[in-house]
Amino acid sequence: MTEPDITHISSRDNPLLKTLRRLAQDPGAYRRLGRVWLEGDHLCRAARERGVRPAMALFSASYWPMARLEWAQCAIKTIVVDDALLAGVSGLESPSPMGFVLDVPESPAIAPDAATVVLDRLQDAGNVGSVLRSASAFGFGQVVALKGTAALWAPKVLRAGMGAHFGLRLVEGVEPEALAALRVPLLVTNAHEGEWLHRTALPHPCAWVLGHEGQGVTPALQARAARQVRIVQPGGEESLNVAAAAAICLHASAAAAAR
């Protein structure tokens, strides 16, 4: 195996470290800088398994001797950083000894016939990441995030997505009018009215619209939907967390398509 060229960083004033701190701790920094920071071997491995080759792979100095065999050829550029300096980049309580820097993928056009999840102003990064993970698990290969939704490539969304980003077509910053490009029926979740999920014949493919955690789906999108659907809740709670509702609805669609 050819040994990669390795850059060593031992100065806390290195400009790359300053950039990484912004990417790790500022949810919108990737939009300004054009790059994404993936922290930890799980996310890095998920990206690599989907054929992603990062611009840079960074390792702590103490971890690099153990990581060399598996990760030596994984990136265009390999960088080894003093342990304390790499830990200082992290936004986590327990920093990881490795990470990738990726160029931000361009947001593609909406694929008209794809099984789709539409995010209507979801605010919580953990919810957004969890929905991406469910979308990937249940075969909804396209996620369209309307303006006002948490940034899809933000660090907390990446961690909650657990690698799902790399198996999805992600379209973000979209105005509601752009959904006219979809040729699949829109299904809207509603806590209080609509057809019962377990009794309705679900079309496939379709586009599930998931709304803001407090306000739900906007009235304009509800009016455009082919169907409003609600989930039976015999325990009597007023509503479900949007990520939990997404998992239930997407699983129901996948099960209906498999029958």
Image: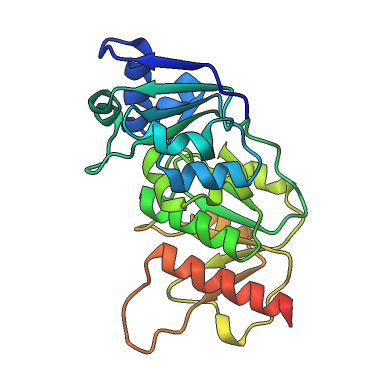
The one nearer the camera, 1 or 33, is: 1
* Residue at 46% over, 69% down: 245
The one nearer the camera, 84 or 224, is: 84
Q: Quadrant of the C terminus?
A: bottom right
* Residue at 52% over, 54% down: 132
Q: Quadrant of the N terminus?
A: top right
The one nearer the camera, 143 or 200, is: 143
The one nearer the camera, 217 or 101, is: 101
**Residue 154 appears at what percent x and percent y?**
42, 38
Is residue 154 at least partly visible in the picture? no
**Residue 67 appears at what percent x and percent y?**
44, 37
**Residue 146 appears at what percent x and percent y?**
53, 44
* Residue at 48% over, 79% down: 231
* Residue at 43% over, 27% down: 58
Q: Is residue 226 left or right of residue 69?
A: right
Quarter holding residue 197? bottom right
Furthest residue toward front: 1
**Which colour scheme appears in the figure?**
rainbow
**Residue 27 appears at what percent x and percent y?**
37, 34
Is residue 4 at least partly visible in the picture? yes
